[in-house]
Image (cartoon, rainbow, N blue to C red):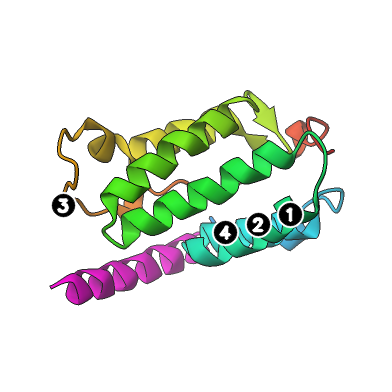
Amino acid sequence: MGEVRAYNLGVLLNRIVKVRKNKGMIAAASNVDSDYPPLYLKGIEHFNECEFFEAHDIWEELWTEHRGTARKFYQGLIQAAVALHHFGNGNTRGARKVYLTSRVYLEEYTPSYQGLDMEKFLGQYEQCFAEVNASKEDYPRLEVDPELIPEIHLDPTHADQGNS
């Protein structure tokens, strides 16, 4: 049963990605301001295509190499990707735990950071995890709603905030 659910979720996520691409909702992050680190942009592309494990890997490479104020920001993004990966694979207990720690890191960077409207992103992220967080069960059997998965869109008006 677990394999069927994971397969169906994968098919559903692929459909969501195709719809987002067709509507122009997934823009190539490489077309964004070159002041951003290339690995940051590459991770965003994977994240928006619901390739959370890949986004995690890319951002982890960036986090490992980076020293400075953005380090915890990258750590928060890594954990957000991991939380969504766990949620998508049915590991809701792990997803909830990583979700909560990722928010601690990311909330430090509101209202915006490195072109990302953090308040909007965190609101979408919270909505995606609302059912998981509301559950009183240790191991709730919930499935992620692909329509609620947050996306990352960089806003050039926030570009001067946090590019270090």
Label 3, label 4: how far apart the Cα atoms are: 24 Å
Label 4, label 2: how far apart the Cα atoms are: 6 Å
Residue 117 lies, in percent from the top left, at 62, 33
The amino acid type, in three-letter code, at marker 4 is His
Q: Is residue 154 visible?
A: no
| Residue position for label 2 | 60
Label 3, label 1: how far apart the Cα atoms are: 34 Å
Residue 141 - label? 3
Can you tell which of label 4 and label 1 is closer to the viewer? 1
Question: Could you tell which of marks 3 and 1 lies nearer the N-terminus?
Answer: 1
| Residue position for label 4 | 56
The amino acid type, in three-letter code, at marker 3 is Arg
Question: Could you tell which of marks 4 and 1 lies nearer the N-terminus?
Answer: 4
Magenta segment range?
A: 1-24
Q: Is residue 36 visible?
A: yes
| Residue position for label 1 | 64
Q: Which residue lies at the image location 74% right of the left edge and 32% below the top edge?
A: 158
Evaluate if marks 2 and 1 touch, with contact meaning CB atoms under 8 Å apart: yes
Evaluate if marks 4 and 2 touch, with contact meaning CB atoms under 8 Å apart: yes
- What element does badge 4 sit on? helix
- In the rendered view, tell whether residue 106 sits above or below residue 14: above
The amino acid type, in three-letter code, at marker 2 is Glu
